[in-house]
């Protein structure tokens, strides 16, 4: 029997329903949650992501502002817009869509966003809060992964978790969130000689490297949870993750759990962005 499916779409809809109720309550109290999204340039994928974020806000009672600029926008002009949004009491979250044109330093832009409005959770302040184990706004994708793991009913405490990937946006914060949940965490990456040596011992595997078939059937143990963060295309052009889904699902068996691509982590990322914006609005003074 294959592993049980972790339905990110269903979980996302459940969480978004709660977001809608909380947003309505805030709006009735005179503080509608507001998200500002800035898109610089004409990257097609970024345009799709931004559209989905704005639509999700509208569908769940959040106010959103979309600012689109040509790729010729200067860094100083972008920083000036961020500063203006920082000062806008109707905006509780600011998201600058990546990637940015080469002449703009992304760290300078991320660092300019007010800590209380950093709903992407990418700033040094947010990272520091996470490292220190303090409350704060968490990066949406790892945050969503934690919700997917929790939805299985498995107690993370005391489990061995392996994170494959060490990016600042997913791998590192994912490891820290698992650590906060009292898991024993191993981080594997391009410098790890034998990733399978670690994943075969893992109760939880999170694959986030952006490479097809990074995790194969011989790399997991029966009964484990596998979360696939990867976004890739196969030879037919179909969307797939970092995990050899069919083979790994069989290897995990009916006691295991696996998230699909699409329909797993993807829906949760935008959902947790909404949750972060709502949290920022609730905490705004």
Image (spheres, helix red, strand yellow):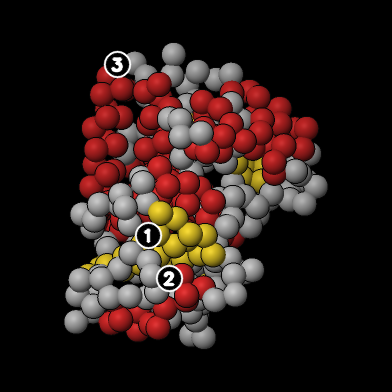
34, above or below 189, in the image: above
Q: Where is residue 219 in the image (x, y as percent from the top left)?
A: 42, 78
Number of numbered markers = 3
**Residue 101 picture location, percent across and down:** 73, 50
Residue 208 appears in the picture as rendered? no
Q: Which residue is drawn at 59% across and 55% down?
A: 167
Give the quadrant of the N terminus.
bottom left
Whether residue 154 is visible to the viewer of this picture, yes or no, is yes
Q: Earlier in the sequence, mark 3 or mark 1?
A: 3
Camera-near label (3 vs 1) is 1
Give the residue drawn at x 47%, y 26%: 92
Identity of the residue furthest to the top in this view: 285
State the image quarter where residue 228 is shown. Answer: bottom left
Judge from the rendering whether residue 49 lies leftward or rightward of residue 20; answer left or right: right
Pointer 1 local density, CA inside 10 Å: few below 14, some 14–19, many at least 20: many
In this rendered view, identify the residue nearer to me: 185 or 174: 185
Which residue lies under the disc numbered 1?
160
Q: Nearer the viewer, residue 194 or 97?
A: 194
Mark 1: secondary structure: strand
User: What is the spatial separation of the Cα atoms under label 3 and label 1, in whole angstroms?
Assistant: 44 Å
Q: Who's the residue at 52% across and 86% down the image?
A: 235
Residue 231 image label:
none
As drawn, the label of residue 29 is 3
According to the picture, the residue beneath numbered tag 2 turns out to be 199
Front residue (pair 170, 234): 170
N-term-proximal mark, 3 vs 2: 3
Q: Indicate which disc, 2 or 1, sits on the residue closer to the N terminus.
A: 1
Give me the residue at 47% from left, 76% from top: 196
126 shown above or below 242:
above
């Amino acid at each position: 029997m294959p592993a049980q499916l972790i339905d990110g779409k269903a979980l996302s809809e459940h969480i978004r329903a709660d977001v809608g109720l909380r947003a309505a309550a805030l709006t009735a109290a005179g503080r509608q949650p507001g998200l500002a999204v800035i898109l610089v340039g004409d990257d097609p994928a970024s345009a799709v992501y931004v559209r989905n974020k704005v639509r999700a806000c509208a569908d769940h009672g959040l106010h959103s502002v979309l600012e689109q600029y040509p790729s010729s926008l200067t860094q100083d002009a972008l920083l000036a817009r961020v500063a203006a949004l920082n000062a806008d009491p109707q905006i509780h979250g600011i998201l600058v869509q990546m990637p940015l044109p080469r002449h703009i330093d992304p760290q300078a832009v991320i660092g300019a966003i007010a800590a209380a409005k950093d709903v992407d959770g990418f700033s040094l302040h947010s990272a520091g809060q996470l490292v220190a184990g303090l409350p704060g706004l968490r990066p949406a994708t790892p945050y969503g992964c934690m919700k997917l793991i929790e939805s299985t009913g498995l107690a993370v405490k005391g489990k061995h978790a392996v994170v494959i990937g060490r990016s600042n946006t997913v791998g590192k914060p994912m490891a820290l969130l698992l650590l906060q949940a009292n898991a024993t965490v191993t981080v594997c990456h391009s410098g790890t000689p034998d990733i399978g040596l670690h994943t075969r011992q893992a109760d939880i595997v999170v694959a986030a490297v952006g490479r097809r078939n990074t995790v194969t059937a011989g790399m997991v143990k029966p009964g484990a949870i596998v979360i696939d963060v990867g976004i890739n295309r196969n030879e037919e052009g179909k969307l797939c993750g970092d995990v050899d889904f069919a083979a790994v699902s069989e290897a995990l068996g009916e006691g295991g759990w696996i998230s699909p691509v699409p329909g797993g982590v993807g829906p949760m990322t935008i959902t947790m962005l909404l949750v972060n914006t709502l949290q920022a609005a609730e905490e705004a003074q």
